Amino acid sequence: MNTHSDVSDRPPDSPNNCSESQPKAFVREEFLACLAPWALRWALAVTILSAVADCFGIWGPPGSANVNWGDWPHFVAYTAKVNSFLPGAVAPPLAIMATVAEALLGVALILGVFRRPVAWASAIVLALFAGAMTLSFGIKAPHNYSVFADVAAAFALGAWPAASADVNQFSVVPVVARPASMKALMPWIAPCSITCSSKQSFASLSGRTRRKVHPWRKRWSLK
């Protein structure tokens, strides 16, 4: 009677299968870690510069579709409404300062210079804008323009690890050859390493168990 199971004939899983997949996973995570801050920079820059362009009528004259102001006088009047808790005389200077700050921050975000200071400055400017809109129009107004989301994006960009915030790091070179990038990937590397080690231990244990059980099953099958 042959009770020998086909399962015992399968070779043990190779421990190298997990280790071979690790570099690919690391490269993928590194690529995403570099892509995310790049996307944040450009999204913030386009959002800020789009508002600056609207101040000067680049998107169209006042009253056009998807145009909030259309020219400088309408933007100054809107600035006075947003800062209704301040004297009306400060509206023109505030409009000038806000426009200059937004233009500089938008260009700096596109160029990628002084990434952290520019990101923090953008977060502060957007947070001030959100606070002024909340005081003047209510909490719903900044949500209509996703101002709070822009503030969160600027804070995330400022807090992003510097080692993974450069778009020039895009590469298919294995991460094991680039130790500087490993620090930013440790939150993803550690779970995979533990999982792979567990799989290797299980595979080696299963192999030893099969080697011990297999002769017994073979003797039993010969009876």
Image (cartoon, grey):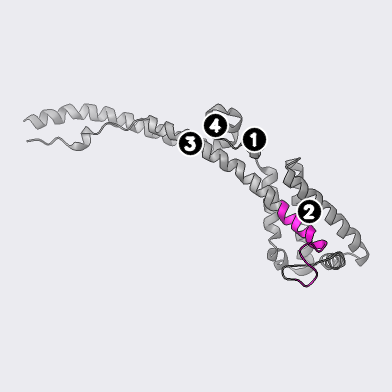
- Residue named by callout 1: 163
Report the front residue among 132 and 75: 75
Residue 19 placement: quadrant: top left
Q: Residue at x 22, y 27 (%)?
A: 212
Please say if the residues under marks 3 and 2 sit with CB atoms less than 8 Å apart: no
**Left or right relative to 72: residue 180:** left
Q: Residue at x 89, y 63 (%)?
A: 91
Residue 112 placement: quadrant: top right
Name the spot of residue 23 as percent of width and height, x first: 48, 33
Q: Is residue 121 visible?
A: no
Span colored in magenta: 45-64
Q: Residue at x 71, y 59 (%)?
A: 147
The tag earlier along the polypeptide, 1 or 4, is 1
| Magenta-span inclusion, residue 108 | no
Q: Secondary structure at mark 4?
A: loop
How many discs mark residues in the rendered view?
4
Q: Is residue 117 visible?
A: yes
Please say if the residues under marks 2 and 1 sit with CB atoms less than 8 Å apart: no
The tag earlier along the polypeptide, 3 or 2, is 3
Q: Secondary structure at mark 2?
A: helix
Please say if the residues under marks 3 and 4 sit with CB atoms less than 8 Å apart: no
The amino acid sitting under disc 2 is Val
The amino acid sitting under disc 1 is Ala
**Rounded to the nearest whole Å, what is the CA distance between mark 1 and mark 4?**
16 Å
- Residue named by callout 4: 173
| Magenta-span inclusion, residue 49 | yes
Label 4 crowd bin: few (<14), some (14–19), many (20+), radius 10 Å: few
**Rounded to the nearest whole Å, what is the CA distance between mark 3 and mark 4?**
10 Å
Name the spot of residue 25 as percent of width and height, x first: 49, 38
- Residue named by callout 3: 24
